Image (cartoon, rainbow, N blue to C red):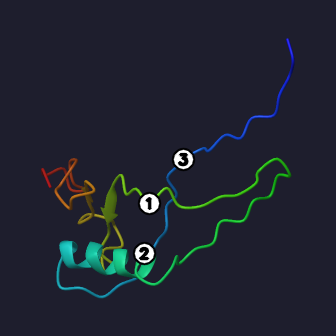
Amino acid sequence: MTVRRHFVHVYTTIRIKVAVDAENHRAAMQAADAVVFGHGYAVRLSPVHTAVIGADYAEEVTEYLVDEADDPDFKRWRNYGPDFTPSRISGDGRAA
């Protein structure tokens, strides 16, 4: 059996923490999207291993976590799906 080179595109999710000012969680997610995706990409992915030819965004948001800055105990965080709908139990145990 002959060994041949394979080019494998590995799609993975990266977490980017973005500081935005907004009136509510939905507006905060929309503002974060504008920063991350609005004018080119806000973060560059740099391959380190010689076998990695390139790295780029998969352009897929799988989830959001919104944490409020004035909440040092993380009691008001919420998880949302890619469509901005609540997806899990919130930080304080209530359904988001």
Q: Is residue 38 above or below residue 4?
A: below
Residue 29, horizontal then vertical, whole percent? 28, 72
Q: Which mark is residue 37?
A: 2
The residue singled out by tag 1 in the image is: 59
Who is closer to the viewer here, 44 or 76? 44
Quarter occupied by residue 8: top right
Inspect the image, locate mark 1, and give the three-letter code of the amino acid beneath it: Glu
Q: Which mark is residue 25?
A: none
How far apart marks 2 and 3 lie (CA) works out to: 17 Å
Apparent side of residue 49 relative to residue 90 in the rendered image (left or right): right
Furthest residue in direction top, as rendered = 1
Label 1 vs 3, first from the N-terminus:
3
The residue singled out by tag 3 in the image is: 11
Inspect the image, locate mark 3, and give the three-letter code of the amino acid beneath it: Tyr
- Residue drawn 25% across the image and 54% down it: 81
| Quadrant showing the C terminus | bottom left
Inspect the image, locate mark 2, and give the three-letter code of the amino acid beneath it: Phe
